Every structure is written in structure tokens, then in C-alpha cells.
């Protein structure tokens, strides 16, 4: 590992192979978004017999507790100085934590209950926090340009969608025909790819270290300053809504498409695969659109069209696969833009903070976002499962439900996602940190960095980089 001198301009754009290598940690995260968000709660509620409301409360309780960890991790990441870099070391740490937790959750021994689920969910969420926080923070440093950030975060989103697609195909390849077999095969897939994806990203990618002009002391006042920023406050509220809407759908997807829409388990899986695969195209197209219209305008358009597509899907005749597939493709295409555009905007705020305060706070900013996502995920599973239990919906395998319970399921599936996604898009009405403003911020930062570092910025090579001079730390 070496340090070379490269200007911000020289580091402005990653080559395609380098970009794909850096994006590989998105594979397990994307796979788990489907496997844990869609399949694991019904697996524990039905197959393992833990109970519908108990599973919902377990996911909600662990998420609400775990969200307090992310701000601490964000601050620690921003203050890290090692020979491996600032964010690389945290990404490497996250791989074994996540892998062990996935194994225990997706391949549980017989007879496990509520406490087992809570304990390993907590470890799992620590692992995902380590990977997603460090990866997003590192991405914001790699991509300093406003439009380049759309490209980098778009690539991560595409890789994540590929992971989500493949994890759905794995049970078919292994010829799994039971809920338990599906979950077990998905777990093995993630256990294999998580260490591999992180290893390739950390070995192939350089990490540029920025120097702060102020002390790195951090207190509650600093945390409040980040939350109270108008641009960050909009992003936080929007991210909560744009995570809660799709998460709400995911939590009860299998129940809705099987019990309310009349599709078989195999058809439901195919429709979900279409939704996810559409995101590959959506991430690329919406990333390109964002370079023309701006990130916040593109996100608002995606939110409106997503909601309209979901409403149309709900009013289609039941059991018609082709029309349902068309609308699932549409909403999946649009949903891909929510996380990639939101995270790219957080990186822009991080630049504004560093210019104004001289402090590197991007890890903390992403910690706020992941904390908000954890709240949204907790509520999406907790609220929907509790509500379904309250209206009398029976989640056990082979159970029959009354027409009233099915109608309640339909209302729960539609109203929540549409309301929250529309609210998330509305948060960006009047948003000010656009391409022009960010260009001014980056110009000022590059000028200051050139002055502080003698017109050169230190770059930690990838672990496989060529040897030259000893490592030095800046900031």
C-alpha cells in the first residue's frame, strides 16, 4: 500500500473496471434487502412459528435500539486514521460481522424463538451499518464532482439490484420448493459473496484522505448542527418517507400477491424479480436524467410516477400476470432512484459542511441517513405486521383468511406506500443545493485543499497498488 500524489481533478472520474470493483459490497446489501426484507419475516412468523405480531415487534424493537449505534459509528469513522485509510478499515471489519449474523439468521436451528431472533438481528444490523456507512462515506470521497456522484452511487445501486436479482434466482437453481429451503439458500448465497465483494473493493480501490482545517472534537452541539441544516433536514425527512414506503410494501409483499392478488408463490417471486431487475435499468437512466435535471427534481418526478404506478397496479384484475409484470417493472424502475439520488445529495451536503466548518462529517451525515432508514424499516415491518394481526389476517402456512381480512390487507398495502412516497418527493420542493451551488462549493474546496496540501492530495493506493513511497497521513 502506498501514497501517491493526485490532484482532485485527476481523481474526478473512476474507470469503469475500478467503479465496478468499488461497487461490489453492494451485492450482499442488495441481496439482503430482498432476502431479509421480504422473506425472513414471513419465514419466522409462519415456518418457524414465532408469530406474526411477535416478529413485527422484534424487527421494530431491534431497529429502534440499533439506530443509536450509527451516529457513534459515523463519528468514529470520520476520526479514523490508519495505514489502511479512513473508511477502508471499517468496510473490512463489517464483512465478518455481517457474514456470521446472516448465517445464524437464515440457517437457524430448530426450535428458536423470540430472543434468538432479537439477538442475531442486532448483530446483523451492526454488520450492515459497518458496511453501508463506510462504503457510502468512501464513495463520497471518491466522487467529488456533482454529476460523478450520480454515476458512482448509480453504479452501487445497479450492483445492489444485481445482488437482489440473483438471490431470488438461487432457490430456483437449487430447486428449493419450501419457504425454509428458500431462506436457507439465500443465506448461503450472502455468506459466500459478502466477504468476496468487500475484499475485492478494498484491494482494488484507492482512498483519498482530506485534511480538515478545524479540530475533530465532536459534541452534541455539532450533531444538532448537522440535523438542523435546512438541506440535511429535507434529506432526512425524505429518506425516511422514501424508505418507509417501499419497505412497507416489501414487508407484506408475499402476503399481498398470494392472498389478495391470487398469484402463486412462483409467480410472486417472478414479479418481484421483475421489480428488482427493472431497477438496473432505472438506476442507470435516472442517474443520467439527474445529470440533466438535477438530483432533487429527478427524485420528485420518480416519486410521483411511482405512486401512480402503484395505484394502477392495485386496480388491475386479479391473477393477470402480464399486466401486473408491466406495472411491477415500472415501479421497480422508479424505486431504484430513491436511494441513489438521496445518498448522492448527502455527499453534496458533506462538501458544504466541510467548506463552512472545515470538518469532515460525511460519515456522520450518512449515519443519520442509516439511522433514519432503520426507523423506517422498523416501522414498515412492525406496523404492517401488527396492523395485519389486528385486522385478523392469519400468516401461518396454509391458513385461509376471511374476505374482510383480505380487503384490509389490500388497503394496508396501498395506502401506506403511496402516502409516504409522495410526501418524500414533496420534501424537495424549493431545494437549493443544486448543480450550480455545488459547483461553487467544490471550486472553493479544491482551492483550499490545494493551498493546504501544496496543490497535491494524498491518496492511499488499493492494497494491490504498486509500491513507491511510505504512507503518510493527512487529516
Image: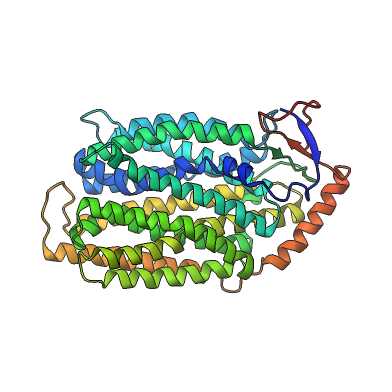
- Residue 204 higher or lower than 415, as above or below: above
Q: How many marks?
A: 0
Residue 392 image point, x, y percent: 16, 58
Horizontal relation, residue 464 to residue 428: left or right: right
Which quadrant: the N terminus? Answer: top right
- Closest to the observer, 122 or 306: 306
Horizontal relation, residue 343 to residue 268: left or right: right
Render colour scheme: rainbow
- Residue 434 higher or lower than 152, as above or below: below
Residue 155 image point, x, y percent: 56, 50
Which quadrant: the C terminus? Answer: top right
- Closest to the observer, 20 or 49: 20
User: Where, by quadrant of the figure, is residue 172 drawn?
Assistant: top left
Residue plotted at (24% across, 59% down): 257
- Closest to the observer, 298 or 414: 298
Residue plotted at (64% across, 61% down): 229
Residue 48 image point, x, y percent: 21, 38
Amino acid at each position: 500500500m502506498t501514497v501517491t500524489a493526485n490532484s482532485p481533478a485527476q481523481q474526478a472520474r473512476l474507470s469503469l473496471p475500478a467503479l465496478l470493483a468499488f461497487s461490489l459490497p453492494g451485492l450482499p446489501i442488495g441481496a439482503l434487502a430482498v432476502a431479509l426484507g421480504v422473506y425472513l419475516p414471513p419465514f419466522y412468523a409462519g415456518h418457524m412459528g414465532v408469530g406474526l405480531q411477535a416478529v413485527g415487534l422484534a424487527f421494530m424493537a431491534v431497529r429502534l435500539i440499533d439506530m443509536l449505534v450509527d451516529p457513534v459509528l459515523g463519528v468514529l469513522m470520520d476520526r479514523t486514521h490508519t495505514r489502511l485509510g479512513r473508511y477502508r478499515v471499517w468496510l473490512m471489519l463489517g464483512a465478518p460481522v455481517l457474514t456470521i449474523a446472516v448465517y445464524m439468521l437464515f440457517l437457524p436451528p430448530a426450535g428458536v424463538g423470540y430472543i434468538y431472533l432479537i439477538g442475531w438481528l442486532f448483530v446483523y444490523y451492526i454488520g450492515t451499518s459497518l458496511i453501508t456507512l463506510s462504503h457510502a462515506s468512501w464513495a463520497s470521497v471518491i466522487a467529488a464532482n456533482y454529476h460523478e456522484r450520480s454515476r458512482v452511487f448509480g453504479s452501487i445501486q445497479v450492483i445492489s439490484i444485481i445482488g437482489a436479482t440473483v438471490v431470488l434466482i438461487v432457490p430456483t437453481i437449487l430447486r428449493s420448493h419450501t419457504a425454509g429451503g428458500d431462506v436457507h439458500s439465500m443465506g448461503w448465497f450472502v455468506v459466500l459473496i459478502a466477504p468476496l465483494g468487500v475484499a475485492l473493493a478494498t484491494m482494488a480501490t484507492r482512498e483519498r484522505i482530506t485534511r480538515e482545517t478545524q479540530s475533530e472534537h465532536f459534541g452534541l452541539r455539532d450533531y444538532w448542527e448537522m440535523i438542523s441544516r435546512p438541506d440535511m433536514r429535507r434529506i432526512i425527512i425524505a429518506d425516511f418517507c422514501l424508505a418507509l414506503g417501499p419497505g412497507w410494501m416489501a414487508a407484506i409483499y408475499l402476503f399481498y400477491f398470494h392472498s389478495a392478488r391470487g398469484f402463486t408463490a412462483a409467480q410472486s417471486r417472478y414479479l418481484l424479480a421483475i421489480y428488482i431487475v427493472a431497477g438496473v435499468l432505472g438506476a442507470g437512466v435516472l442517474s443520467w436524467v439527474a445529470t440533466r435535471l438535477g438530483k432533487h427534481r429527478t427524485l420528485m418526478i420518480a416519486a410521483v410516477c411511482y405512486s401512480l404506478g402503484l395505484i394502477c397496479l392495485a386496480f388491475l384484475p386479479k391473477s393477470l400476470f402480464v399486466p401486473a409484470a408491466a406495472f411491477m417493472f415500472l415501479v421497480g424502475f422508479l424505486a431504484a432512484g430513491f436511494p441513489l439520488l438521496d445518498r448522492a445529495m448527502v455527499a453534496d451536503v458533506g462538501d458544504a459542511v466541510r467548506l463552512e466548518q472545515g470538518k469532515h462529517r460525511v460519515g456522520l451525515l450518512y449515519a443519520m441517513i442509516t439511522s433514519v432508514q432503520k426507523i423506517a424499516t422498523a416501522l414498515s415491518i412492525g406496523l404492517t405486521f401488527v396492523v395485519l394481526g389486528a385486522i385478523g389476517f392469519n400468516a401461518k402456512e396454509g391458513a385461509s383468511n376471511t374476505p374482510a381480512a383480505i380487503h384490509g390487507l389490500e388497503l394496508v398495502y396501498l395506502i401506506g406506500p403511496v402516502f409516504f412516497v409522495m410526501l418524500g418527493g414533496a420534501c424537495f420542493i424549493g431545494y437549493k443545493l443544486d448543480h450550480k451551488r455545488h459547483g461553487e462549493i467544490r471550486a472553493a474546496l479544491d482551492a483550499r485543499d490545494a493551498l493546504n496540501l501544496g496543490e497535491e492530495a494524498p491518496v492511499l493506493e488499493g492494497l494491490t497498488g504498486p509500491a513507491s513511497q511510505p504512507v503518510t497521513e493527512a487529516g
